[in-house]
Image (spheres, rainbow, N blue to C red):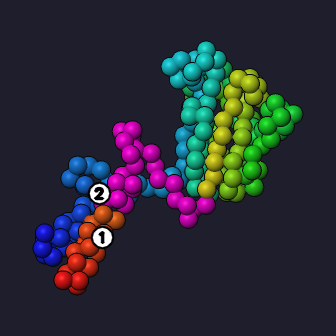
Amino acid sequence: MSFVPRLRLGVAAAAMGIAGFAGAGVPAVSAAATGAAITIHEGPPGCSTPSYCFAPSAVTVNAGATVTWTDGSDSPHTVTRCTPSACSGAGGGTGSGTGPASAQFGQGQKYTAAFIGTGTYLYYCTVHGYSVMHGTVTVVSASSAVPAAPKTGAAPPLTLATLLVAGGMTTTALGIRRRRTR
């Protein structure tokens, strides 16, 4: 393959990575996770057990983001940071902030907490106990920008774009290097 086609191939691959296959409806870069939503369910299909649960039970957000819990069950609940005595020896996690601490809220009601300090925050429902209902919020620094999970279950678009850009730049560099060595 001559230098010009290699260069075109590299530029095309880089452009597709940057564009993120916009024509296919896939964004080039996912937005950073600036918040999360958790629903309280009762039994399947929302829970893997017949009792209550937080779904999803684990979320990751950027520092400064909020997490909102919505009670989708028929019972009141709380969202409270763990202590070793309340959570079967599990502490509240490594997060440097205070963590969630709600009053009881009922069906259709919401509770929102902001997470500033990085680390993990283990929480539970004081009404039903840690063994029945618990979850984790992981907070990362904003510079670690958490890509939003794609709705399709496919690999995150950021990864695809990054690979295409890297592949395109490598192809371009190889084309230039081979041209110079001939």
Which residues make up the magenta segment?
141-165
Residue 16 in magenta? Answer: no
When the figure is inspected, residue 141 is found, relative to residue 58, above or below; the finding is below
Percent across and percent down for residue 34 are 53, 53
Q: Secondary structure at mark 1?
A: helix
Residue at (83% x, 39% y) in the render: 83
Q: Amino acid at mark 1?
A: Met
Residue underneath mark 2: 20
Residue at (53% x, 23% y) in the render: 46
Q: Amino acid at mark 2?
A: Gly
Residue at (43% x, 55% y) in the render: 31
Q: Quadrant of the C terminus?
A: bottom left
Give the class, few, some or many, for how many residues have Cα within 10 Å of label 1's Cα (few <14, many ≥20): many
When the figure is inspected, residue 98 is found, relative to residue 174, above or below; the finding is above
Q: Quadrant of residue 180?
A: bottom left
Q: Quadrant of residue 74?
A: top right
Residue 169, disc: 1
Residue 143 in magenta? Answer: yes
Asked if the residue at tag 2 contacts the one at tag 1, i.e. Cβ–Cβ closer than 8 Å, the answer is no
Which tag, 1 or 2, sits closer to the chain's start? 2
Residue at (72% x, 33% y) in the render: 124
Q: Residue furthest front?
A: 182
Percent across and percent down for residue 119 are 69, 53
Q: Nearer the viewer, residue 75 or 123?
A: 123
